Image (cartoon, rainbow, N blue to C red):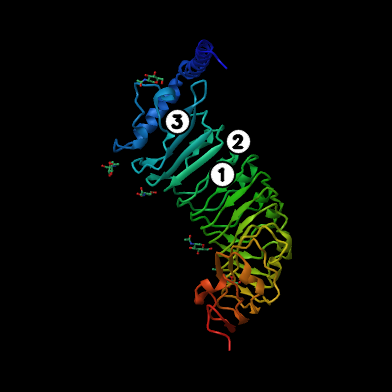
Amino acid sequence: MLSPTSKWSYNLFLNTFLLIFVLSFNLGSSTSKCNPNDKNNLLEIKKHFNIYGNASTFVSWDPNTDPCTNWTVGINCDTNGRVTNLLISSDYDVVGEIPASIGELPYLQSLYLSYLPHLSGPIPLFLAKLTNLEQLKLGYNLSGSIPEFLGQLKKLTVIDLSSNTLTGSIPSSLSHLPKIRYISFENNMLSGSIPTSFGSIKSLGQLFLNSNNLSGPIPSSFSRLSNLNFLDLRQNQLTGNIPPSFGSFKALYLYLSFNNLSGPIPRSFGNANLPQLLISNNKFTGDASFLFSKDNTVISFIDISNNLFNFDFSNVDLPQSLNYLDISHNKIYGSLPKRLGQLPLKGIDVSFNQLCGKIPTGRRLKRFKPTLFSNNKCLCGPPLLPCR
Ligand SMILES: *[C@@H]1O[C@H](CO)[C@@H](O)[C@H](O)[C@H]1NC(C)=O
Ligand SMILES: *[C@@H]1O[C@H](CO)[C@@H](O)[C@H](O)[C@H]1NC(C)=O
Ligand SMILES: *[C@@H]1O[C@H](CO)[C@@H](O)[C@H](O)[C@H]1NC(C)=O
Ligand SMILES: *[C@@H]1O[C@H](CO)[C@@H](O)[C@H](O)[C@H]1NC(C)=O
Ligand SMILES: *[C@@H]1O[C@H](CO)[C@@H](O)[C@H](O)[C@H]1NC(C)=O
């Protein structure tokens, strides 16, 4: 056991150690006062955006203090006093176009001008000067098109231009970004087709192009995106089949609902690792029974509703992992498999098909609303009327 004296010296040692640590930390950032050019540009940015003078982002942006040490919101610096991150977010009182002074912060790695409802104008060419940029998120009210030059910012790992009013097509030059992991252009007004060249972006993990006006097919080159784990193409005007080569992904959340896709879905989906498959509101035809397999331990969400699927449901092998099943508004026939009554389902809809026979008993299914089983050929039993 420590004596009181040695305990005291032990504490002294600890405190001294902490003090040295804290001092050297402060020393590190205070010797590196903000680069004067960077400071001037930050003050320009403030002047440009803060037209009402009340934007909360800029409260600490005092011209008489040092940005790297004293400005508490919106910026980070490296040890040389260069501004590496500019993060202006969720501020109603930030108003106007992206100012040219942002292009004069050459050490920027992250640029977030996000959730700014009054950020307007195009994505300006001077952002091409930010060659150290790794993360770019801009929104909410930008117009114009997605510029080609983004394909030259080779360090980019994240591009998020979601929820603007961007028009025009997606530049294929973005496929030249060697490190890009995340692309979101969701909720814009983009048109034209999805660049085939995107199939060569080996690093791509997540691609969100949903809620646009994209047309043409899903490029079959996408089958080569071995790191892809989230593909959301919902709510576009895509046509054609799902490429037969789809299915070899490691684990893909695949969302294709509300398009104009057609044909049968690929057989390869039978042994694909698809935790969630959302392909409703298209014109898919034929068999989908191979989606269901007792051996499938990953699929939790299947929505194939509002298509033209036409197959016998009686003998499908339902996966235990299934939480949510929507097969409504198709031409599916046969009966509901017994096992359906035993799955831990949180949601189900089998309405508007050609199903017949007794709804499986078990504690689960009768809790659901009758309408989720209605408009079939002759389904019966709880929650519908008793079988005759
Ligand atoms: C900031 O000023 C503008 C213009 O006067 C006003 O519309 C806005 O509500 C103000 N914001 C806050 C948080 O007071
Ligand atoms: C700026 O920050 C430093 C370090 O935190 C502090 O010592 C100094 O008092 C601050 N200056 C002002 C004017 O707030
Ligand atoms: C959105 O941008 C347009 C110009 O592109 C502008 O006229 C409009 O006022 C902006 N909306 C808001 C909410 O600031
Ligand atoms: C969507 O694209 C179609 C042509 O493919 C065009 O006729 C239509 O106007 C576009 N809609 C919007 C909102 O851009
Ligand atoms: C959807 O595809 C059908 C042919 O399969 C075509 O006749 C129809 O015009 C397409 N609709 C849209 C909105 O693209």
Of residues 143 and 381, the one drawn nearer to the viewer in this rendering: 381
The residue that label 3 is drawn on is 75
- Whether 41 is drawn above or below 361: the answer is above
Q: Is residue 6 left or right of residue 199?
A: left
Of residues 350 and 45, the one drawn nearer to the viewer in this rendering: 350
| Location of residue 90 in the rendering, given as x and y in whole percent from the top left corner | 40, 43
Marked residue nearer the N-terminal end (1 or 2): 1
- Which label number is shown at residue 148? 1
Residue type at numbered disc 1: Glu
Mark 2: which secondary structure? loop
Marked residue nearer the N-terminal end (2 or 3): 3
Q: Are marks 1 and 2 in contact (CB under 8 Å)?
A: no
Mark 1 surroundings within 10 Å by alpha-carbon count, few (fewer than 14), some (14 through 19), many (20 or more): some
Q: Residue at x 50, y 47 (%)?
A: 161
Report the number of numbered marks. 3
Q: Residue at x 44, y 49 (%)?
A: 143
Q: Quadrant of the C terminus?
A: bottom right
